[in-house]
Amino acid sequence: GYLEAQVEPAAFLDLLAYHYERGDNLEKRREYLLRAGEAAHYAHASQAALDYYYRLLPLLEDDAARIRMHLKLSPVLEVLGRWGLAEEHTRQAWKDAEPAGDLGAQAQCCRSFGALARQRGDYTSALEWFERAGVLWWEAGDVVRVGQVLTDIGGVYVRKGDYQAARRHLQDSLALARQQGDPVGTAQALNNL
């Protein structure tokens, strides 16, 4: 409370996370560990993001929050080259998301598995995982994410040297992004095109 009132919270996330971690306010501890981890991830400070996320994970009580945290850990670990651990967190998220019927989380797991396969050079598996993610997001009604995964698929085809298939998927991604008013998806599709 007092510290938040004295400073701009976004500018002092590390300090606020440190402060609340030593206090009794569990809700604030969770909030600032998450915010500090996301800020570190956004700033490409992957090791710091990993540290915050690992400190937060045992504090999460509901399945949905744990699923989201495992899915936040996976790409950070992927960037750090710790693909085995990234895969473990994705598998844990999948294990929790599937019985809950959470199509969005299942799709994100598929996308994570696809990204790991792409990193390993297993383009056939990457395409299968990305396509599965697209189907799940379509079923969940998340057209923006369908467009983003089409960009992932196009990127795999670029790596394979199949530029015709890459262009087709990237153009479809661009069309969906523009239709949905998704500036990030539009930029990603154009960049890859």
Image: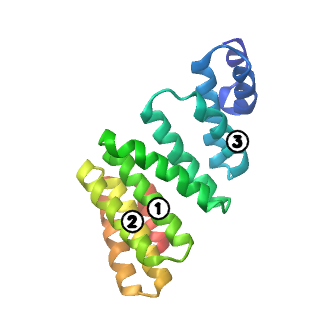
Please state which amino acid type lies under the numbered disc 3: Asp
Please state which amino acid type lies under the numbered disc 2: Trp
Q: Residues within 10 Å of mark 3 (few under 14, many from 20)?
A: some
Q: Is 27 positioned to the left or the right of 110 in the image?
A: right
- Mark 3, residue position: 51
- Give coordinates of residue 61: x percent, y percent: 50, 26
**Count of numbered marks:** 3
**Label 1 to label 2: alpha-carbon separation:** 6 Å
Residue ID at (27%, 60%): 135
- Mark 2, residue position: 129
Please state which amino acid type lies under the numbered disc 1: Phe
Viewer-side residue, 130 vs 191: 130
**Label 1 to label 3: alpha-carbon separation:** 22 Å
Marks 1 and 2 in Cβ contact (< 8 Å): yes
- Give coordinates of residue 2: x percent, y percent: 71, 11
Residue ID at (60%, 19%): 26
Q: Residues within 10 Å of mark 1 (few under 14, many from 20)?
A: many
Residue 193 in view, yes or no: no
Q: In the picture, which quadrant includes the C terminus?
A: bottom left
Residue ID at (39%, 79%): 166
- Give coordinates of residue 55: x percent, y percent: 66, 34
> Is residue 41 positioned above or below 13 on the image?
below
- Mark 1, residue position: 113
Q: In the picture, which quadrant includes the N terminus?
A: top right
Among the two numbered marks 1 and 3 on one chain, the one whose residue lies closer to the N terminus = 3
Residue 192 in view, yes or no: yes
- Give coordinates of residue 162: x percent, y percent: 41, 87
Label 2: element kind:
helix
